[in-house]
Image: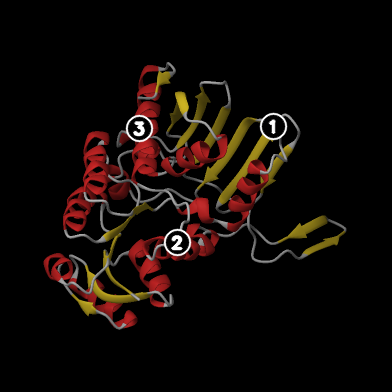
């Protein structure tokens, strides 16, 4: 079993801790959080101790550090964990600054540490199957990837002000998915957007509605649509079009039951938010990470993937501000 410390006992930290607590390879030894009560509650749930970063990293029985704390703590914690020889799972983004994120990746590589970045959507069973179909040539040569991602409602303004903006906070998941599904690195991005769902988000200097288009050197395209408001639930869809056909993954629903009457056909609404929609993805993501740490050869998104997605987000922000396509460094 692998000894684990979970840093961050908020919503995402709790998801990871609960999945780790059920996993046969994991032994959660410490929960760390700046809020003592949150750490104590989660530690009691997992049968772990409330600890500090210093204590956890000094413990030779700790093999894995799960970083689920606020983004501004990621870089420091990655560096400390790498120097302590611990494998790392870090939530996205690595940092809001690409130069700092690059330093984190370099430190991890310097110490030969495994670091998985929390792009959970790659592990969703439907999206994983879609990727397998692409790799098996069902669509032929990929030409256009279309990604739709819409949240049911905007987050609080306090969150918006610290998020780094829609491209770095929300669409960064889709930038990673675009890279993964295109099969080639995007070299250019164009983006436009506005504050259509909540004018206060615009006053805070951000947008809540956006479209971005990625282009690869060979001309493959990925179009991404994001909104922080969606009246019918958590809208998550992907379509990949190619020279031989198309493959797509639609929204998940509580059941597949469909009824019909004089008013037409009816089925369950889409799932309400990411906790429900990506429950399997979070579980499978952590399973694959632990198996990689244990020596299995499994492909997972790692530090360079986190850096590249952040670089695309930075380029998209510049494209939004200038109104022109921007080359991706």
Residue on which the image places disc 3: 311
Quadrant assignment, res 271: bottom right
Residue 192 position (above or below residue 283): above
Q: In the image, what residue occupies the spot 39% across and 31% down?
A: 312
Residue on which the image places disc 1: 242
Q: In the image, what residue occupies the spot 31% across and 33% down?
A: 205
Can residue 37 be seen here? The reply is yes
Query: Secondary structure beneath disc 3?
Result: helix
- Label 3 vs 1, first from the N-terminus: 1
Q: Residues within 10 Å of mark 2 (few under 14, many from 20)?
A: few
Q: Position of residue 110 (x, y in %)?
A: 22, 45
Q: Nearer the viewer, residue 201 or 81?
A: 81
Quadrant assignment, res 58: bottom left
Quadrant assignment, res 310: top left
Q: Residues within 10 Å of mark 1 (few under 14, many from 20)?
A: some
Q: Nearer the viewer, residue 45 or 200?
A: 45
Residue on which the image places disc 2: 296
């Amino acid at each position: 079993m692998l000894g684990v410390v979970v840093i961050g006992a908020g919503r995402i930290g709790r998801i990871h801790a609960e999945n780790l607590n059920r996993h046969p390879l994991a032994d959660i030894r410490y929960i760390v959080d700046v809020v003592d009560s949150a750490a104590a509650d989660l530690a009691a749930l997992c049968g772990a101790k409330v600890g500090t970063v210093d204590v956890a990293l000094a413990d030779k029985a700790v093999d894995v550090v799960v970083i689920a704390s606020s983004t501004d703590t990621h870089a420091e914690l990655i560096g400390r964990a790498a120097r302590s020889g611990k494998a790392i799972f870090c939530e996205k983004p690595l940092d809001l600054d690409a130069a700092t994120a690059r330093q984190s990746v370099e430190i991890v590589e310097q110490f030969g540490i495994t670091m998985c970045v929390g792009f959970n959507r790659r592990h969703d069973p439907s999206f994983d199957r879609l990727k397998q179909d692409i790799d098996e040539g069902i669509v032929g040569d990929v030409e256009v990837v279309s990604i739709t991602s819409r949240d049911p409602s905007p987050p609080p303004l306090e969150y918006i002000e610290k998020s780094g903006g829609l491209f770095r906070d929300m669409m960064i998941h889709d930038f990673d998915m675009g890279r993964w599904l295109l099969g080639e690195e995007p070299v250019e991005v164009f983006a436009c957007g506005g504050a259509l769902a909540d004018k206060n988000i615009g006053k805070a200097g951000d947008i809540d509605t956006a479209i971005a288009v990625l282009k690869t050197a060979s001309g493959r395209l990925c179009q991404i649509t994001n909104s922080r408001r969606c009246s019918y639930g958590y809208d998550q869809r992907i379509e990949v079009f190619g020279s031989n056909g198309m493959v797509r993954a639609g929204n998940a629903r509580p059941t597949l039951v469909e009824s019909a009457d004089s008013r037409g056909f009816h089925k369950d609404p889409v799932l309400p938010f990411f906790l429900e929609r990506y429950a399997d993805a979070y579980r499978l993501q952590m399973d694959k990470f632990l198996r990689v740490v244990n020596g299995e050869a499994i492909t997972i998104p790692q530090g360079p993937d986190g850096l590249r997605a952040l670089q695309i987000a930075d380029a998209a922000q510049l494209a939004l501000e200038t109104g022109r396509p921007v080359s991706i460094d």
